[in-house]
Amino acid sequence: MKRDRRVEQNDRRKRYIELGLCMTCGKKNDTQGRNCQKCLDKIKNQQYKWKLNNPKRTKEIHKKSYLKNRDTILHHAKVYSRNIWLECIYHYSYGTMTCACCGEPIIEFLTIDHINGGGCKHRQKIGVGTVFYHWLIKNGFPEGYQVLCYNCNCGRDKNGGMCPHKTPSIIPQSLNTTNDKLGMSVN
């Protein structure tokens, strides 16, 4: 008898969907999906309450789902992270997608630099990687950042805030010739 009720319920839902009605309540559907907004809100609320009342079961379900779809989830996370990073690079490079100092065009070498320094403290406060890029977007791309390649960014850190491209070399000329004889280039 229970089975007959399920069959009837499924048949009714199929009919409602074919007619463009909400499959739950049978009223006019005002959304793109199978349920009207009122039923969607009700279902969402019921799911939220169930998750609160069943934390162990919820964790089991999420773990099982994650293990089943791990590769897809990781792929989507990687794509999402890269898109956020690219959006920040695009904005702070003013659409050029190059280093503000040396003009390096290889995107994988580019990063966001704190113009006035203090990046270490800021990363400790906000977070690193995608968290930092998400923070930039969420805060409307605040001023005080620029795009540099990793060489220029690290060079600024080691050289008191000035990129080595902008300052004369501090390596004595005699050392340069010694390295040239060894087949190494310093500049």
Image (tube, helix red, strand yellow):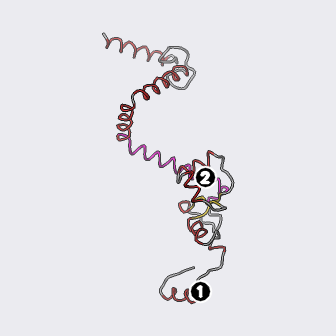
Residue annotated with mark 2? 88
Q: Where is residue 104 in the image (x, y as percent from the top left)?
A: 60, 66
Question: Which residues, given as a range, are shown in magenta?
Answer: 68-97
Q: Which amino acid does label 2 sit on?
A: Cys
Q: Residue 172 carries which label?
A: 1
Rounded to the nearest whole Å, what is the CA distance between mark 2 and mark 1? 39 Å
Asked whether 80 falls inside the magenta stretch, the response is yes
Q: How many labels does the image show?
A: 2
**Residues marked 2 and 1 touching at CB (< 8 Å):** no
Q: Position of residue 36 (x, y in %)?
A: 54, 20
Q: Which amino acid does label 1 sit on?
A: Pro
Q: Position of residue 76 (x, y in %)?
A: 46, 45
Residue found 61% across the figure and 52% down from its top: 88
Residue farthest toward the top in the current orientation of the protein: 1
Q: Which mark is residue 84?
A: none
Crowding at label 1, few (<14), some or many (≥20) Cα neighbours within 10 Å? few
Q: Where is residue 111 in the image (x, y as percent from the top left)?
A: 57, 59
- Figure check: 7 above or below 176: above
- Figure check: 53 above or below 139: above
Q: Is mark 1 on a helix, strand or loop?
A: loop
Quadrant position of the C terminus in the picture: bottom right
Position of 100 with respect to 58 (left or right) is: right
Instruction: Say whether disc 2 or disc 1 marks the residue closer to the N-terminus.
Output: 2
Asked whether 23 falls inside the magenta stretch, the response is no
